[in-house]
């Protein structure tokens, strides 16, 4: 059944029902923090996400680099952030946002569920999705041994042999996590040097269950009902060989979820949204924060920092809109309220 809670605007031909000051798209750390700050500014705020609030926090077992929390489960930090934002008035709703656009000063957000929302400002905190390897077998064995989430799927591989692909923070951290279930974890990296933080590297090197396979790429994933092997190629000497494994966890970065804009928004060549220091995108009234934005690091700490800036900038933007509206009314008393 398709539901439309609020129907507005030129497309619908109906007048506005409930509308928001700010709609936050995405309920990861950035989205929840934007909700908190907008709520504290007494802005009528809606946070939309296709899933339960938490974003990448829900795919991370332990967080140990968020100041003030020596060690906290990702799911607990997510719950706390959500409760905190709700306490200050942010409303959370499920919805898969498919389109965001601007008509003059009005912003519209459409969801796959058939809802259309209107706001004065939108803060896009949509993060990214796992990058795919694009090799034969990857799509065929998705959910049957190919995974992008160790926290979600690791427990299915008790005493088994796993391959992890990648050399960044995620591959090394999640590879280490997987050793609590697997009897052996191969981390397959295309170079002979990791990109991951030194502290994560040290733990992985000290873990007797982890073996690194350097200068190597996965060319194919195969098996019968489930994954049974990966075909590897050494990029230095060209050797091709087959490694028997029961599962493959792919952590080769992610692709920003920036394809929800009706009108082109400025991005870098990889699709990350370009903002200024106020988190303004190239579309006035639309802001971006967190992993979806061009930046050097993708940590929870800088995601919430971005979101703080975006929320306060959105607040100032809305105040300016209201000032302009007041001035226009003063200049032309016959003008009706929008
Ligand atoms: P990432 O830092 O972009 O690393 C991706 C890794 O995959 C790199 O080692 C890269 O190799 C490799 N790779 C990329 N494309 C590949 C391909 N087609 N085939 C084989 N290997 C490929 O991605 P990430 O580890 O997912 O992390 C994403 C962001 O989240 C980063 O900013 C990271 O710091 C952050 N993060 C932080 C934590 C933490 O702080 N605990 C945990 C997870 C993620 P090269 O090195 O050769 O480029």
Image (tube, rainbow, N blue to C red):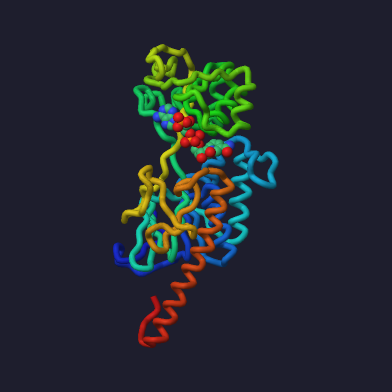
299 vs 1, nearest the viewer = 299
Is the residue 301 above or below the residue 329 in the image? above
Q: How far across and how far down the image is residue 313, in percent?
A: 50, 63
Is the residue 86 above or below the residue 196 in the image? below
- Image quadrant where residue 300 sits: top right
Is the residue 103 above or below the residue 246 in the image? below
Tally of numbered discs: 0
Q: Quadrant of the C terminus?
A: bottom left
Q: Residue at x 41, y 50 (%)?
A: 273
Is the residue 76 above or below the residue 8 in the image? above
Q: Residue at x 36, y 83 (%)?
A: 335
In the rendered structure, the answer to whether residue 12 lies left or right of residue 35 reads left
Q: How far across and how far down the image is residue 319, in percent?
A: 49, 72
In the rendered structure, the answer to whether residue 145 lies left or right of residue 90 reads left
Q: How far across and how far down the image is residue 256, in percent?
A: 42, 43
Q: Residue at x 42, y 77 (%)?
A: 324
Q: Residue at x 40, y 24 (%)?
A: 141
Is there any visible trace of residue 1 in the rendered image? no
249 vs 273, nearest the viewer = 273
In the rendered structure, the answer to whether residue 8 lies left or right of residue 69 reads left
Q: How far across and how far down the image is residue 305, in percent?
A: 56, 53
Is there any visible trace of residue 79 in the rendered image? yes
């Amino acid at each position: 059944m398709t539901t439309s809670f609020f129907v507005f605007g030129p497309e619908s031909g109906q007048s506005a029902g409930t509308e928001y000051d700010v709609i936050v798209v995405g309920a990861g750390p950035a989205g929840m923090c934007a909700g908190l700050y907008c709520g504290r500014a007494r802005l009528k705020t809606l946070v939309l996400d296709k899933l339960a609030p938490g974003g990448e926090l829900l795919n991370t077992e332990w967080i140990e680099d968020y100041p003030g929390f020596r060690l906290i489960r990702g799911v607990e930090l997510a719950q706390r952030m959500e409760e905190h934002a709700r306490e200050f008035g942010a409303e959370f709703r499920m919805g898969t946002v498919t389109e965001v656009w601007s008509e003059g000063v009005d912003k519209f957000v459409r969801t796959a569920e058939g809802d259309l929302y209107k706001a004065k400002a939108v803060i896009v905190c949509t993060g990214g999705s796992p990058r795919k390897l694009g090799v034969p077998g990857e799509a065929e064995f998705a959910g049957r041994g190919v995974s992008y989430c160790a926290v979600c799927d690791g427990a299915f591989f008790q005493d088994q042999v796993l391959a992890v692909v990648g050399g960044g923070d995620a591959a090394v951290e999640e590879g280490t996590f997987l050793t609590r279930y697997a009897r052996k974890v191969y981390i397959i990296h295309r170079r002979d040097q990791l990109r991951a933080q030194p502290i994560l590297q040290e733990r992985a090197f000290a873990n007797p269950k982890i073996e690194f396979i350097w200068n190597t790429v996965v060319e194919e994933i195969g098996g019968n009902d489930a994954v049974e092997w990966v075909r590897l190629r050494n990029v230095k000497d060209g050797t091709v060989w087959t490694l028997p494994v029961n599962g493959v966890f792919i952590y080769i970065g992610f692709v920003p979820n920036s394809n929800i804009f009706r009108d082109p928004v400025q991005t870098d060549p990889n699709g990350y949204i370009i903002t200024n220091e106020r988190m303004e995108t190239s579309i006035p009234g639309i802001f971006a924060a967190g992993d979806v934005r061009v930046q050097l690091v993708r940590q929870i700490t800088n995601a919430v920092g971005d979101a703080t800036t975006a929320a306060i900038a959105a607040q100032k933007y809305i105040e300016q809109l209201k000032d302009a509206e007041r001035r226009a009314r003063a200049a032309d008393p016959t003008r009706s309220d929008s």
